[in-house]
Image (spheres, rainbow, N blue to C red):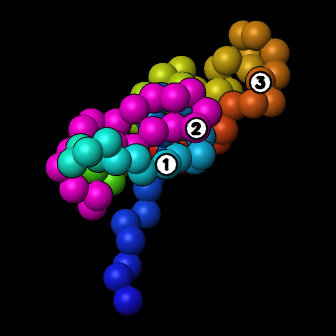
Amino acid sequence: MVERMWLKPCPFCGHSILTTDQERDEWHVTCGHCHARGPISYGYDLCRESWNKLGNMAHPVPPETLKKLFGSFPDLPERDDK
């Protein structure tokens, strides 16, 4: 049995609705929430690895600070890089 690489949440919006797509011999990961597209790679596992190397760009300001400034944000996913 082949073990597939786990994908990190979208670095742009933080959601985990992700697909691995192929167009000819090019592969990429796409976020189903914000439609961000990861780097193009020439292999399934390589594209998933490239996606996981993207930095966490979701919520550069901590959610706690945003809540203090603007009220509640129920759609913000929790950050795991505290």
Q: CA distance from mark 1 to mark 2?
A: 7 Å
* Label 1 crowd bin: few (<14), some (14–19), many (20+), radius 10 Å: some
Residues at discs 1 and 2 in contact (Cβ within 8 Å):
yes
Q: Identify the image quadrant of residue 37.
A: top left
Residue 75 appears left or right of 62: right
In the picture, the quarter occupied by the N terminus is: bottom left
Residue 55 appears left or right of 43: right
Type of amino acid under label 2: Gly
Which segment did they paint magenta?
Answer: 28-46
**Residue 30 percent across, percent down from the top left:** 45, 39
Q: Which residue is mark 3?
A: 73
Q: Which residue is mark 1?
A: 19
Q: Residue furthest top?
A: 69
Type of amino acid under label 3: Phe
Name the residue located 56 percent from the left edge and 27 percent from the top edge: 34
- Asked which secondary structure carries label 1, the reply is strand
Foreground residue among 25 and 53: 25
**Residue 64 percent across, percent down from the top left:** 68, 27
Q: Residue furthest bottom?
A: 1
Q: Is residue 15 magenta?
A: no
* Label 3 crowd bin: few (<14), some (14–19), many (20+), radius 10 Å: few
Name the residue located 49 percent from the left edge and 48 percent from the top edge: 19
Q: Which residue is mark 2?
A: 32
Foreground residue among 20 and 33: 20
